[in-house]
Amino acid sequence: MTAAHAVPALRHDWTLEEVNALFARPFADLIYQAQSAHRAHFDARDVQLSTLLSIKTGACPEDCAYCPQSVRFDTGLEREALLPVEQVRGAAQRARAAGATRFCMGAAWRSPKDKDLDAVIKMVQAVKDEGLETCVTLGMLKARQAEQLKSAGLDYYNHNLDTSPEYYEQIITTRTYQDRLDTLGHVRDAGLKVCCGGIIGMGEASGDRAEMLRQLANLPEHPQSVPINNLVQVEGTPLAGIESIDELDFVRTIAVAKIMMPASYVRLAAGRETMSEATQTLCFLAGVNSIFYGDQLLTTTNPAHLKDLALLDKLGMRPEATPKYSDIGPGETPSAERAPQAARV
Ligand code: SAM
Ligand code: DTB
Ligand code: SF4
């Protein structure tokens, strides 16, 4: 490879001015830069498919203003106890049969109790047995808990920064930004892969989006997965009725994330159901290479999975067959060619 084609080193020293300058670039230049950065690290046809399952729903003591699962807001959500492991295994089998390669389990906890963690570990092992990468999101973790999850074979831990440190206090008062950074440190130190991103469309300023991305990219390692959620507005939460973000500003955020963290999966996460196929396509051009795949997110709905497969097909894209960063051998890798089932994922 000549010097002219050398892949630039990953950076962890972004200034806010530099990030704001990226946001201010002409749209076509920004997309071109993001797609070029993406192609230096990934096959641009591939899209990683992650299926979500809520393993413990509702009655969460935290006050995250976006979240339908907080006990403090009346969203009409029925609370559910921790699911039995065999129910989780069944959902993982359906996800795999439909072509997902990663299975993400979410619990509405501030932090897991030790007996909860034992139950989650059994779920992780069951999902791994089905040949899927595993991800869990359980709230704040202690160092020892992160190590236990790593020993159990967990691949990814999801814990989002959600927004900039400055805007954070408008959104959550029951735990601090530093609490989040501490959990991310424990997860990283345990050798787990990190899934960490945020939410756009919560009334934040463009500078808050830039600062959130700066925080993510300046972590000691780039999170291997960066989910960018477009706020799903749920009646009863404090953020219901807020003005939605301009879709092109959302695409810009994706492009800047990819330029700053080019070797990471950037996931177009929650909020696709109200997004046109044209905007989703712009997100792919801006370097998105992961989506939540399955008819359900945690407590809200997602586009039908067959509709997603049809969109990928229309764009000449395809479900990623071999996950990057994975320790699943090629022989065990779920096949993208497996016929997707019509059943609900
Ligand atoms: N309770 C754990 C925690 O908060 O760390 C794990 C589950 S929580 C639902 C995981 C993430 O989902 C949140 O950090 C937030 O980024 C995202 N999320 C929750 N509600 C959302 C909504 N209405 N729209 C978009 N993203 C949302
Ligand atoms: C993430 O960044 N988004 C997911 C996942 N990580 C756990 C959650 C989205 C939740 C959307 C609202 C709901 O369905 O409850
Ligand atoms: Fe609880 Fe997580 Fe929802 Fe916050 S985002 S209220 S911690 S489930």
Image: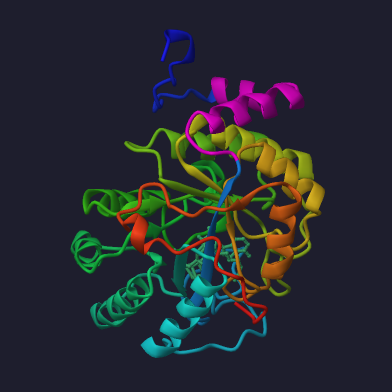
Magenta segment, prevailing SS (helix, strand or loop): helix
Closest to the observer, 49 or 299: 49
Closest to the observer, 5 or 136: 5
Residue visible at 30% across and 51% down in the picture = 182
Residue 139 placement: quadrant: bottom left
Left or right, residue 332 beside residue 315:
left
Magenta segment: does it hold 19? yes
How many badges with numbers are in the image? Answer: 0
Residue 28 is situated, as x and y percent measured from the top left of the image, at 75, 25
Left or right, residue 256 beside residue 130:
right
- Please, is residue 39 above or below residue 299 in the view? above
Residue visible at 55% across and 31% down in the picture = 39
- Please, is residue 79 above or below residue 323 in the view? below
- Please, is residue 224 above or below residue 214 in the view? below
Q: Is residue 135 visible?
A: no
Residue 326 is situated, as x and y percent measured from the top left of the image, at 35, 52
Q: Can residue 108 be seen in this view?
A: yes
First to last magenta residue range = 17-44
Magenta segment: does it hold 343? no
Residue 5 is situated, as x and y percent measured from the top left of the image, at 48, 15
Quick one: quadrant of the C terminus?
bottom right
Residue 332 placement: quadrant: bottom left
Residue 144 is situated, as x and y percent measured from the top left of the image, at 18, 63
- Please, is residue 187 above or below residue 207 in the view? below
Quick one: quadrant of the N terminus?
top left
